[in-house]
Amino acid sequence: MGHSSPLPGFTMDLTIFLQNLAGGLLIGGVYALVGIGLSLIFGVLRIINFAHGGFVVIGMYAAIALYGGLGIDPYLGALIALPLGFLLGLLLERTILARLVDAPPESTLLATLGLALIIQNTLQLIFGAEPKSVFVPYGTATVEFGGITLSVIQLAAMAIIIVVIVALWLFLTRTETGRAVRATSQNRLGAELVGINTLRIHGLVFATGLVLAMTAGILLIPQISVTPVITGPVFTLKAFVVTVLGGLGSVWGAIGGGLLLGVVEVFGASYISNGYRDTYGLIAFLAVLLLRPQGLFGRTVKRV
Amino acid sequence: MISEKRTSSQGRTAPRDRTTWHLVALLLLLVAVALVVPRVSGAAIVIAINVLLYAGWATSWDLLGGWTGQVSLGHAAFVGLGAYTVALFAQRLDLGLWVSVPIGALFCALLALGWGAMTFRLRGSYFVLSTIAVAEILRLVAINETWLTGGAQGIFIFSIPRLLGLDVFERSTQLFMALFFFALVLCVTLFVSRGRLGYRMRAVREDEEAAQAAGINPQRVKLTAFALSGALTGLGGAFYAVYLSFLEPHDIFFLPLSVQIALTAIIGGRGTIWGPFAGALLLVLSREMFRGVFDQANLLIYGVLILVVVLFAPRGMLGELARAAVRRRYAGDSRG
């Protein structure tokens, strides 16, 4: 529980304010990474992926299995886990979603919901229901900037996220395949007419979305614990909140939405009530859905 | 009015004469349960209660999700609201079930009206997302407002007066309560789906703009369906509170319960009278069967079944059967 006063007094509380802001932005970066994946998948495949939180959880358990089972550091383990995740994404897209390309949107929504249940419950069968975490030796290290304390692994996570986002941006804007992805998201039929194999693009984007979510999971697992059946839905919801705040289908919107959600959560928890931490994002989400369905940062109204 | 008549003459899947058969089937179900109950062990009664409870919930959900076409993944909100209202009114205020259960259903109808008035402007996936958010907010309120709900530690229900002279904590009494709940929901659905409201609901489901052009007010139809669906689900929630005799926000308001209710109806067949019941039968029984195998991971079976349905039988079990029957009758003329 933080401060109960809604109007923080100045001098001392400025530090608290900045501390909260930094904490919010750091967790928001991870939310952004989760949201970008969901937004990419929505933008290109036009599906709402209910399994997205499950992908985050797959990343967490991959790190747990590699660290707990084989003693491989989570960050190094990512080099093994992420390529496997990419293959899994291709497989899931090919076996399930590719068959539903022309089905009504509800069918794909239900299919990903089924996928989410399968992921959560399979992980629970393998790893059990009790919370698990990874304790890396450097997990508790902190650095101080003018009275603000920041966790080293959170800072490292932020650095990695920035690198990933820049790489993704370069891929989408500077490569032929990236241009094909954007073309497919703008107009699938048009993209096909100019010779783009949109089904392959779908597979690529779905697998990329899965890998981005897994990366977020791997970055988070030294900081928080995971249970398959609860953590999955929690992150699915957070990803929805992020993408709706930013505008469904917009990658830049997801970054803004993620940072905003992180800050809103931390400030709400600190200045209003910690118990309602998860509510602030949901209320913002409902408000945006009702008042500005194109998202805070979106320009065009898209009907889904 | 003219256009409405045209809609009704087109609905060839719902001839009035079949209502009798549905009622006969329901009567047979009642007789079967009444005959079997005294002879079976406690475990079988619990399974039967679960089948009827989920069948009732799924049928209630279907009024909105199947007949009106608005998929909700937030129906646990009504279960929770109905359950907590009964827990608080019947126990803390000592008002008895005859008063507190209708109050719970009324609260649910009001919640649905407010909720729907806000969110029915949203279409498709956006509407689904908003239903999840509303239910989640209620869950967090139930966890945090400890003075009212007992918070995360939950609330025990132990002192509820007898109902018609029967102990409501007895499993056999509860079975009849579940049976009553399902029979009531089924009759309401039967009545609604055959009436003017039912045709309007289907018109809105098929094409909202066209329905509006035909003089139907889609917003009002959706709100009516939502209020009805919510009140009935809350009724099931009220019974659920007695059945569990222990309420915990985490169990009763949580997304997985909403998902189970929706999937039961979808797997069985949306917009069919007996589809949700078939879904409940299949899902509760297979959950029981695999309980030993999957332990806590019993929603795995839901996940597998929903994928099978989406990929191979998009109309659900009974939906596909009905379509096959219609196809046979009209030999070639499609669109069942």
Image (cartoon, coloured by chain):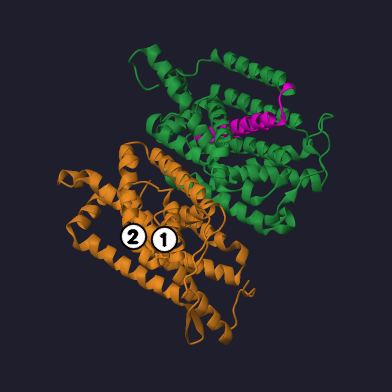
Chain colours: A orange, B green
Q: Chain of mark 1?
A: A
What's the chain of the residue with tag 2?
A
Q: Are tags 2 and 1 found on a single chain?
A: yes
Within the magenta stretch, is there residue B57? Answer: yes
Mark 2 lies on a secondary structure that is: helix
Q: Which residue is mark 1?
A: A66
- The three-letter amino acid code for the residue at tag 1 is Leu
Q: Which residue is mark 2?
A: A80
Left or right side of B32 for B93: right
Residue B145, picture quadrant = bottom right
Residues B326 and A67: in front is A67
**Mark 2 and mark 1: Cα distance apart in space:** 9 Å
Q: Residue at x 46, y 19 (%)?
A: B13
Nearer the observer, B50 or B28: B50
SS under mark 1: helix
Q: Position of residue B266 (x, y in %)?
A: 49, 33
**Rendered location of residue A257, percent (x, y):** 42, 63
Report how many numbered discs are placed on residues in the image: 2
In the rendered image, which quarter is residue A166 located in? bottom left
Q: Can I make out residue A147 in this image?
A: yes
A139 relative to A114, above or below: below
Q: Residues within 10 Å of mark 2 (few under 14, many from 20)?
A: some
Which residue occupies 73% across, 55% down? B148
Considering depth in this image, is A161 or B90 the residue closer to the camera?
A161
Q: Which residue range is magenta in the image?
A: B39-66
Q: Amino acid at mark 2?
A: Ile
Q: Is residue A163 above or below residue A13?
A: above
- Is there any visible trace of residue A250 in the rendered image? no
